[in-house]
Image (tube, grey):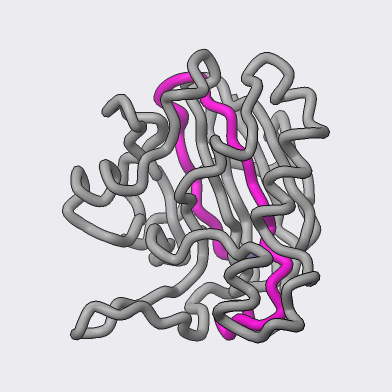
Amino acid sequence: MLTASELNPAKALVNEVCLSGESWMHLIRKGQTFRIEDLEGNQAVDTLFYNAHDAEDRYDAVQTIARQRNIYLTTGSKLISTEGNVLLTITADTCGRHDTLGGACAAESNTVRYALEKRPMHNCRDSFLHALSHSPCNHDLGLTKRDITHNINFFMNVPVTPDGGLKFDDGISAPGKYVELRAEMDVVVLISNCPQLNNPCNAYNPTPVRLLIWD
Ligand SMILES: [Zn+2]
């Protein structure tokens, strides 16, 4: 469901641009609102969420899909954790489709999906791992590569075919579209702004996103 937000970016506590191929990790406190803005359109923003006080309790794609009875996320969707808690609720969405199935690109998936020589290309799994080893946010959480689980791809269009296959289709997002989430507990967000050059979802052109947090 398409829903606009009343929040004013000029009043945000955090307002940062994350370039394609870069990672971003940040604490979002209970009650704060977090926005991801697709600055140039059709970017895939690979995202994971963790309970800030218990890293074992993190975004769970299967529970989220089962609880919503929907494989896509939009306004009103609740992101459910492995322990069955509500991590965040989507409160505004001007794109209308966010993927829960496609997962993050990795050196291995680059070789399987595209070609053997794509293996050394930048990928989201490596970006996630880079953030875990460099972000001060991870000092107390202690996340390691085993904590990189099934992620959300904001703005990514991954239709399911009638026989149950996945398609990586052209995106339906556009410059300035955004999704906004209210934190229902203290959460840590981990983003890889996808550097993928082989996927039609982003027109083979990875682009920056803006990340904002309001009290
Ligand atoms: Zn990726």
Is residue 91 located in the magenta-colored stretch of the structure? Answer: no
Q: Position of residue 162 (x, y in %)?
A: 19, 85
> Could you tell me if residue 176 is visible in this image?
no
Q: Position of residue 95 (x, y in %)?
A: 46, 66
Q: Quadrant of the C terminus?
A: top right
In this image, 202 relative to 33: left or right?
right
**Depicted 4 relative to depicted 147: above or below:** below
**Depicted 173 relative to depicted 210: above or below:** below
Residue 93, quarter of picture? bottom left
Q: Position of residue 203 (x, y in %)?
A: 64, 85
**Depicted 211 relative to depicted 215: above or below:** below
> Could you tell me if residue 57 is visible in this image?
yes
In this image, 119 relative to 158: left or right?
right
**Depicted 180 relative to depicted 55: above or below:** below
- Magenta part of the protein: which range? 177-202
Is residue 199 located in the magenta-colored stretch of the structure? Answer: yes
Q: Position of residue 31 (x, y in %)?
A: 47, 22
**Residue at 65% across / 21% down in the picture?**
142
**Residue at 17% across / 53% down in the picture?**
69
